[in-house]
């Protein structure tokens, strides 16, 4: 069973390298969104619906249902795919479940990017700066120096234009995608970093309840939790995945977003209902496999 990781903005698949190494599993795919460390296909509008459709197409190519993990906008595309194409997914994890809340509100940077001229001016300034200067902004949000420089060095005009088009297509994403993000049949986990300045914990929690997903709070982690401490992030827990059939029979399906008992690890808190199957680490989520490799699909 394949595990698929989807990055966000302004990022590349490299954001997952440390976490994948810590998970140490095979059959792992880190996708590269079109226009992010890859070419923007001719005629590709870089809208939220086009990216979600692109992700669904990548999963179709893999054949069997996958364990799907998304961060930032990658997590938003996870929200959409599990809502509209649930047959493609065996289990799912997102840190952007708030996008599935009908009352979702964008952060201040997003509002700049959604504004004509202001968004262009923002990225013109960023592209005129050195990679080291751009890296400083990532470090302010908790990203260590080396991965911050890697993130900053990949920002280019193509990526910036895709970001502007994506955000401008998504002004009302909560109202457009939120109604479909409900009673998702595959087991899901919503990650909520305590220090994330961009994504609302309240929206994520509300959306998790409607989606019948569990939540896990990452105490002390920010938006780029997978870069801050990959080894700790890999210990996030969720219910064990089933080898066949539904992950939980109807009689044992967990109550959504209830506080959990019985464990904590390095500041990570899981919310797991008391009547669920045993919890395991994120290692077991990712397909119950054993060694990580990183592949790109274009």
Image (cartoon, rainbow, N blue to C red):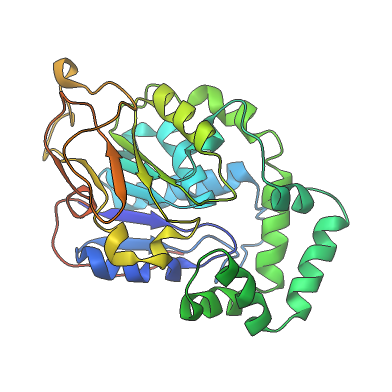
Quadrant of the rendered structure where residue 255 is?
Answer: top left
Residue at (14% x, 30% y) in the render:
245
Residue at (70% x, 84% y) in the render:
130
Residue 249 or 37: which is nearer the viewer? 249
Q: Position of residue 153 (x, y in %)?
A: 59, 80
Q: Position of residue 206 (x, y in %)?
A: 48, 26
**Left or right: 143 with respect to 188?**
right
Q: In this rendering, is residue 40 above or below 250?
A: below
Residue 290 or 135: which is nearer the viewer? 135
Outermost residue on the right side: it is: 117
Residue at (30% x, 49% y) in the render:
268
**Left or right: 134 with respect to 55?**
right
Residue at (44% x, 43% y) in the render:
78
How many numbered circles does the render carry?
Answer: 0
Outermost residue on the top side: it is: 251
Q: Position of residue 288 (x, y in %)?
A: 14, 51
Q: Position of residue 161 (x, y in %)?
A: 72, 62
């Amino acid at each position: 069973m394949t595990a698929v990781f989807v990055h966000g903005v302004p990022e590349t698949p490299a954001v997952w390298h440390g976490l994948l190494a810590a998970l140490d599993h095979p059959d792992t795919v880190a996708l590269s969104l079109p226009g992010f460390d890859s070419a923007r296909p001719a005629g590709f509008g870089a809208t939220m619906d086009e990216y979600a459709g692109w992700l669904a197409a990548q999963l179709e190519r893999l054949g069997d249902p996958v364990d799907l993990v998304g961060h930032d906008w990658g997590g938003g595309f996870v929200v959409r795919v599990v809502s509209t194409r649930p047959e493609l997914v065996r289990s799912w994890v997102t840190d952007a479940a708030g996008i599935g809340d009908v009352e979702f509100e964008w952060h201040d940077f997003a509002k700049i990017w959604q504004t004509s001229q202001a968004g262009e001016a923002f990225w013109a300034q960023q592209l005129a700066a050195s990679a080291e200067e751009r890296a400083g902004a990532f470090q302010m949000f908790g990203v260590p120096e080396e991965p911050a420089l890697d993130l900053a060095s990949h920002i280019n005009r193509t990526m910036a234009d895709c970001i502007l088009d994506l955000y401008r297509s998504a002004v009302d994403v909560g109202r457009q995608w939120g109604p479909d993000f409900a009673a998702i049949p595959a087991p899901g986990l919503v990650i909520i970093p305590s220090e994330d300045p961009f994504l609302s914990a309240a929206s994520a929690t509300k959306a998790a309840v409607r989606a019948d997903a569990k939540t896990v709070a990452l105490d002390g982690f920010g938006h780029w939790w997978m870069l801050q401490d990959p080894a700790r992030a890999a210990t996030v827990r969720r219910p064990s995945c089933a080898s066949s059939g539904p992950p939980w029979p109807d009689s044992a399906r967990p109550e959504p977003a209830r506080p959990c008992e019985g464990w904590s690890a390095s500041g990570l808190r899981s919310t797991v209902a008391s009547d669920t199957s045993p919890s395991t680490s994120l290692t077991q989520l990712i397909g119950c496999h054993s060694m990580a490799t990183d592949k790109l699909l274009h």
